[in-house]
Each structure stands twice: as C-alpha cells, then as structure tokens.
Amino acid sequence: MKSVEIYAGPSHKWTLLGRDASKPKLIIDTNQYLIHSPHEAIILDPGGIELFAPMLEALVKIVPLSQLKHLFASHQDPDIISSLGLWDQVLDGATLYSPWLWEGFIRHFGMDRTQFCGIPDSGMALPLSTLTLQCIPAHYLHSSANHHVYDPIAKILFSGDVGAALEPVDSPLFVDDFTSHIDKMTFFHQRWMPSDTAKRDWIRRVRSLEIDMMCPQHGRIFRGAAVAQFLDWFEQLPVGIAVA
Ligand SMILES: [Fe+2]
Ligand SMILES: [Fe+2]
C-alpha cells in the first residue's frame, strides 16, 4: 500500500493511504486518509475488511497505534467501513464518528470496544487536540445520511464518493488535466448520485469553503483550479439516471 503525505503544516499532517497493488482484483480501489498530529490521529473512511492488514502495516510506520483514537465513516458502505470489526479489536477505546442514521447498520460490521458518536443531520464540529474538523452534510450523495470532512487549517475537503473515479491502482494521485478526467467520473456520478436537489445544496455549501484540495474516497485528488472545475461540471451534470 502506498503512503503519500499530501499536507504538512505546523500542527498536523494528512497522509493518503491507498493504491494497494496487493488488493484483490474484484474489489474497487479506495483512498484512506490519515490526519495526524504529534499526539493523535484519525482515519477518514478506514476501508474494507480486505484492506485491514495493509492499512495497519502502513499506519504503524507513521503513528503509534495508541494514537489512533478516532475513526470517521462518511456513510455505511462496505468499502468505507467493513474493516470496523478488526479495528475494534486492535484499538483501545477509539471513537467512530458516523451519521447517526446508520448506527444500527454499521454495528453489523462488529463494534464492541469502540464508542459510536452519531453525527447529526446538520453536521458538527469534530474537535481534535490541535485542530477542529468540520463534518459537512452531504446527504443523498450518495447515501441517505452522509457527511464529508473539512479541515479549515489545511483547507482540505474530504469528499467521500463525490469526485470519485474508479481507476486502476497505478493511476496518478492528482487530477492534472480536468477535461481528460471527466470521462472517468461521468457514469459514476450519474448512476450513484440520486438527487439533483441534494447535489445543488452540497455545491452551495462547498462553494462557501476555501478549498485547496478536494480529496475523494476513490480516484484522484483535485487541487487548485480543478476544485472549481469539478463543482461547475457537477452542477450541470444530470444525476439519478437509472429512473430517467
Ligand atoms: Fe459509497
Ligand atoms: Fe465509495
């Protein structure tokens, strides 16, 4: 599994864990994001059960396991959080932040020692010792209860399945040419995103944030001008095509 530092500031860092060449072929590739300070760490969308071993191996090279005190799951999908039962066995008293609506479903992945903190529909602040992250509502994009995470210091938005592209594990980490990347995103967004109303609400909210990088759970990271290009493209894209 690759481990790439994508932001380093005075108080904390972001590391992308992903592009795992040993991944079973028939599961989709996922990006896991580790935010870590000298004292604590959080993983955004820890990933599927198949990725647990390479994730753990990569993680302990960056932070001691005892510092991983928080997990965040944007929604309930298996590629997001089916590893939960294994994290639950190796972490001592961690807290999982996830939409409140999904608690009874997510507990099916196995959760005995981990605390569940339900994120209300309106979002919430997620305070760590050196910074406060913001949970940004992204309901129906694609899951009925869904949140993204904004870091106002690094100016990074973790955007879950929004901005996703399903690509091979050797694909580049960043969108360098937005126009040529469109083909890789179109079907995913049209088929997985059900609601134009939800889409417009999210775009309005996200445009009010200052964003240097938008980091999806699949595919490439948008940076600089590519962030606004993505929002403009997504705004005009018809979604929910299965019932069109
Ligand atoms: Fe999903
Ligand atoms: Fe996903």
Image (cartoon, helix red, strand yellow):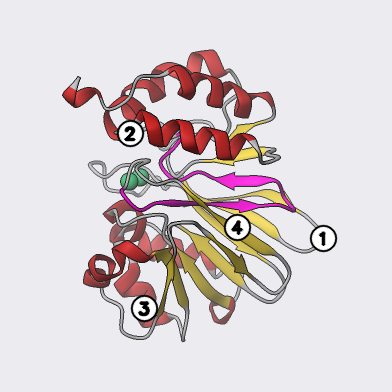
Chain-order first, disc 1 or disc 4? 1
Is 162 above or below relative to 123?
above
CA gap, disc 1 to disc 2? Answer: 37 Å
Note whether residue 168 is visible: no
Q: Mark 3 points at which residue?
A: 88
Chain-order first, disc 1 or disc 2? 1
Q: Name the residue under label 4.
A: 134
Residue 150 counted in the magenta span:
yes
Q: Name the residue under label 1.
A: 10
Residue 19 counted in the magenta span:
no
Residue 23 in the image: state x and y as whole percent: 33, 48
**Residue ID at (33%, 29%):** 188
Is 86 above or below relative to 227?
below
Q: Is residue 55 left or right of residue 211?
A: left
CA gap, disc 1 to disc 4? Answer: 19 Å
The reply to whether discs 2 and 4 touch (Cβ–Cβ < 8 Å) is: no
